[in-house]
């Protein structure tokens, strides 16, 4: 079975632009979460979606938004990009619930110039 | 929110050596995972271990939930074990987000 997939793998944008990152979960998984990992740190939680509804949101500004589609894939949007948004963006999928394993995709590397 | 601390922050070992990585967390959890992040950034699942002991080849892990710590053991280290190891938890009192530790960077020298 395919694992979590993300696109694109790499992206270069300039300050002020907008970006959309995409994630497809493992087949059968209905929960998708997004994490941001800046260089030298552990991943930080951005959003969690389950059955197209937002289940949780981390400490990120309103420039960050996300949605989940009927096929459980998800998009993360970031508006008005700042240099500090440069990071590895990771998507994780899981079955519903807290006591289950989360599986991560390969990530999208975003560089903001 | 829950705090997760990992030690040591850096570890350099000769190939063939054994190592123990520690993860301390500040509150009760219902999910604890260990990951290995490879040089390309991929987070590879090692263990889902909110309590108890598990083994997978040269790797094993133990979580003592009542004392709020987990240990990852790597035996007979190989150069391919190099990378950053993260512990991540989900608190009993929050949503389903994983809170990651700061990681342990392991370097295995041939």
Image (cartoon, rainbow, N blue to C red):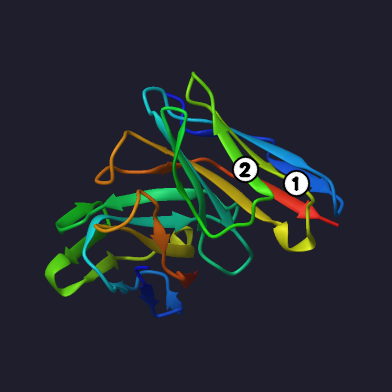
Q: Quadrant of the C terminus of chain A?
A: bottom right
- Per the rendering, the mark at residue A79 is 1
Residue located at (39% from left, 55% from top): B98
Residue topped by disc 2 = A65
- Which chain is disc 1 placed on? A
Classed neighbour count for the residue bearing mark 1: other residues with Cα under 10 Å, few (<14), some (14–19), many (≥20): some
Q: Is residue A39 left or right of residue A29?
A: right
Percent position of residue A58, x then y: 50, 55
Q: In this view, does B35 lie to the left or right of A68?
A: left
Q: Which of marks 1 and 2 is nearer the N terminus?
A: 2
Classed neighbour count for the residue bearing mark 2: other residues with Cα under 10 Å, few (<14), some (14–19), many (≥20): some
Cα separation, mark 1 vs mark 2, equals 8 Å
Q: In the picture shown, does residue A10 fall above or below B104?
A: above
Percent position of residue A50, x then y: 41, 33
Q: In terms of depth relative to the viewer, which is nearer, B93 or A91? A: B93
Q: In this view, does A66 lie to the left or right of B89?
A: right
Q: In terms of depth relative to the viewer, which is nearer, B53 or A78? A: A78
Q: Do labels 1 and 2 share a chain?
A: yes
Tags 1 and 2 in contact by the CB under 8 Å rule? yes
- Per the rendering, the mark at residue A27 is none
Percent position of residue A4, x then y: 49, 33
Q: In terms of depth relative to the viewer, which is nearer, B96 or B84? A: B96
Residue located at (24% from left, 46% from top): A99
Q: In which quarter of the image is the N terminus of chain A?
A: top left
Q: SS of the residue at dot 1? A: loop
Q: In the picture shown, does residue B3 fall above or below A2?
A: below
As drawn, the residue found furthest toward the front would be A62
Percent position of residue B106, x then y: 46, 70
Residue located at (27% from left, 58% from top): B93
- Which chain is disc 2 placed on? A
Residue located at (59% from left, 69% from top): A40
Q: SS of the residue at dot 2? A: strand
């Amino acid at each position: 079975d395919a694992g979590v997939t993300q696109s694109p793998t790499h992206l270069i944008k300039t300050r002020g632009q907008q970006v959309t990152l995409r994630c497809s979960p493992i087949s059968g998984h209905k929960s998708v979460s997004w994490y941001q990992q800046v260089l030298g740190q552990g991943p930080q939680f951005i959003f969690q979606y389950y059955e197209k509804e937002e289940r949780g949101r981390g400490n990120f500004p309103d420039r960050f938004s996300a949605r989940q589609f009927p096929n459980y894939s998800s998009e993360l949007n970031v508006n008005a990009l700042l240099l500090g948004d440069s990071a590895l963006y990771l998507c994780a999928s899981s079955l519903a619930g807290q006591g289950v394993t989360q599986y991560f995709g390969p990530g999208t590397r975003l560089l903001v110039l | 929110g829950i705090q997760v601390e990992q030690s040591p922050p850096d570890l350099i070992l000769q190939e063939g050596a054994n190592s123990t990585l520690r993860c301390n967390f500040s509150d009760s959890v219902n999910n604890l995972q260990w990951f290995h992040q490879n040089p390309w950034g991929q987070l590879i699942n090692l263990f889902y271990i909110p309590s108890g002991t598990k083994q997978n080849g040269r790797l094993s892990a133990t979580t003592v939930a009542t004392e709020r710590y987990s240990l990852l053991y790597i035996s007979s280290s190989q150069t391919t074990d190099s990378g950053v190891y993260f512990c991540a938890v989900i608190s009993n009192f929050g949503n389903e987000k994983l809170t990651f530790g700061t990681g342990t960077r392991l370097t295995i020298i041939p």
